[in-house]
Image (cartoon, grey):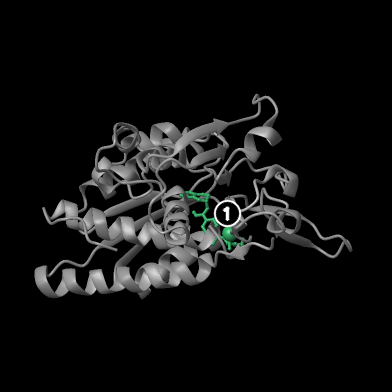
Amino acid sequence: MTAQVIDGKAFAAGLRTRVAAGVARLKAEHGITPGLAVVLVGEDPASQVYVRNKGEQTRAAGMNSFEFKLPADASEQELLERVAALNADPAVNGILVQLPLPRHMDAAKVIDLIDPAKDVDGFHVVNAGKLAVGAEGLVPCTPLGCLMLVKDRLGGNLAGLNAVVIGRSNIVGKPMAHLLLKESCTVTIAHSKTRDLPALARSADILVAAVGIPQLVKGDWVKPGATVIDVGINRVPKLDGSGTRLVGDVDYASAAEVAGHITPVPGGVGPMTIACLLANCLTAACAQAGLPKPAL
Ligand SMILES: Nc1nc2c(c(=O)[nH]1)N[C@@H](CN(C=O)c1ccc(C(=O)N[C@@H](CCC(=O)O)C(=O)O)cc1)CN2
Ligand SMILES: [Mg+2]
């Protein structure tokens, strides 16, 4: 079998178009322009690219973009004060602090200060708790994007499917598992202490790899016909030694011979992260205005 490729880049472009239409309607019918504030601390090159892309895509969707840059040696207190000011700013509907933060800052403390209604990353414990109990809240962008791709491919109904999520981070693994559970999948979260991970992975109709280990998941870990979602973004040296290339947590070549559907890296899950961020910002702006959740 050769898997069908899930084109996340194309799906994300479609989602951004739907968000832009929703933003235009919100402006026309209610005079509201959603605003997204992104805070970057330090000069991590990858983070700078992601923040720049977030600003560009926010503006392209017709929303206001506010960007704040703090030096790598800024104090945690300065960052907390910036977040508090954004919480109080009515022009700001969504707040995002780009991760990772410098070592001297406590990300949990910073996220905890973000108003949960403006927490477009869905990382605040209030939103994590809402997801865990199946209540309406803001959902982390990467797992939300993964779920959209899976539902699009499998026709929307995932009930009864076996899902294995490799990775237990608060940002991807845990929320991904909750989202799949909400779809009535039978969900297992695997991690570094899991015994016989290849055998467990082979039981999955939906296999999500989010561990940050380059090409961990091999073709013989994949159940024939399974849907494989690769969340990994790992930069590894090129085989000829000329710089680096991006690979996922899945060994794409061998997995694609067995899977039914598979996301590539790049161009799979990655582009969905920012598209879902825009969707969350529109959702947050509607909720703050007492309007129903937009259908996207
Ligand atoms: N506050 C947050 N910080 C971080 C998040 C997040 O969701 N919120 N996620 C990642 C970084 N990230 C967005 O912030 C992000 C990562 C990757 C992509 C993407 O489009 N990837 C491309 C490849 C890009 C490349 O060449 O490097 C792809 O996979 O096709 C977008 C956003 C950590 N921090
Ligand atoms: Mg990708």
Q: Quadrant of residue 267?
A: bottom right
In the image, taking residue 171 as reference, residue 216 lies left or right, namely right
Q: Amino acid at mark 1?
A: Glu
Does mark 1 have its CB less than 8 Å from ligand 1? no
Q: Quadrant of the C terminus?
A: bottom left
Q: Quadrant of residue 23?
A: bottom left
Q: Quadrant of residue 103?
A: top right
Q: Residue at x 51, y 40 (%)?
A: 163
227 in relation to 275, above or below:
above
Q: Is residue 75 visible?
A: no
The x and y percentages for residue 219 are: 73, 49
Viewer-side residue, 187 vs 31:
187
Locate ligand 2 by image quadrant: bottom right
Q: Is residue 45 visible?
A: yes
Q: Residue at x 43, y 61 (%)?
A: 152
Viewer-side residue, 175 vs 286:
175
Instruction: Check disc 1 and report the residue beneath it.
Output: 43
In the image, taking residue 98 as reference, residue 166 lies left or right, namely right
50 in relation to 88, above or below:
below
Q: Residue at x 62, y 40 (%)?
A: 211
The x and y percentages for residue 218 are: 74, 47
